[in-house]
Image (cartoon, rainbow, N blue to C red):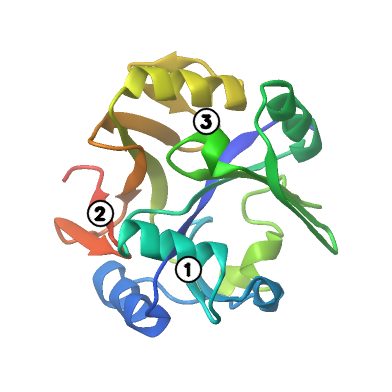
Amino acid sequence: MKPYLRLRQVCLISADLAGESARIKASLGLQECYRDPNVGKYGLENVLFPVGSSFIEIVAPTRPGTAAGRFLERHGGRYGYMVILDCDDPERRQAHAASLGVRTANLIRHGDYLGVQLHPKDTGAAMIEFNRTVGGEDPLGPYAPAGPDWQRAMRGGVLRAVEIECPDPAALASQWGKILERPVKSETITLDAGEIRFLPGAKPVFAGVVLEAAVPSTVEICGVRFRSVDA
């Protein structure tokens, strides 16, 4: 099996799951594919929308005291929560991150799925997740977080990039490049599918998503700007 590391999913947070879901459908023309019951144990509910073979996820807290709820309070309902990468070797990547002093915040195992979430205080700006679904080498194949038949909701488009803002883009890009074991060029990390771009900003945050899709100029969803490749 050829090694791979792909930008597969972005996770956003909102206190208004229904409202932001409606905004995604109306603004981006996407269709819901799944609501994952496994997130309930974390005090969350969620919904996923395919963009081609990648995904936009929104999570919302259902009880006080959740990590997602604290994120909402800290950032006032703005910015993205997690950059999710699928790969062939999440356990090896977890060990590599640990060798750099990056802690694992959460380890998720169920069925044919393994997810490794790295601590955002160690990564900076956003949580990074490495995951793998058995049989998921094919981007159109199984992807456990999106449910058993996500392909039925697939619409055109490509998740091209996430945009991370911070006071020192070169330094944070270098840090993420070491974690992801990828070179950095012009403050950009290129993956086997998608990119992570680092831009100047007042504080380290996950601020934007770039889509190859029909986006009406720039639209804000869950406090994150979404724009098309040409916008």
Residue 72: name its quadrant.
Answer: bottom left
Q: Contact (CB < 8 A) between labels 2 and 3?
A: no
The residue wearing badge 1 is 69
Q: Which residue is mark 2?
A: 225
Pointer 3 residue: 191
Name the amino acid type tagged 3. Answer: Leu
Q: Position of residue 13 (x, y in %)?
A: 43, 65
For marks 2 and 3, give the CA distance: 21 Å
Task: Identify the residue shown where x is 34% and y is 75%.
Answer: 20
Is residue 60 visible in the rendered structure shown here? yes
Task: Classify 166 as above or below 37.
Answer: above
**Which amino acid is tagged 2?**
Arg
- 76 lies left or right of 182: left
Q: Is residue 87 above or below residue 139?
A: above
Question: Which of the two discs, 1 and 3, labels the residue nearer the N terminus?
Answer: 1
Within 10 angstroms of label 3, few (less than 14), some, or many (20 or more) residues? Answer: some
Indicate the amino acid at tag 1.
Answer: Gly
The disc, 2 or 3, on the residue closer to the chain's N-terminal end is 3
Q: Position of residue 109 (x, y in %)?
A: 81, 58
Residue at 24%, 49% (x, y): give it. 228
- Residue 202 falls left or right of residue 70: left
Kindly state the secondary structure of the residue where label 3 is placed. loop
- Mark 1 or mark 2: name the one nearer the start of the chain: 1
Task: Kindly report the distance in space between the C-alpha atoms of the residues bearing marks 1 and 2.
Answer: 21 Å
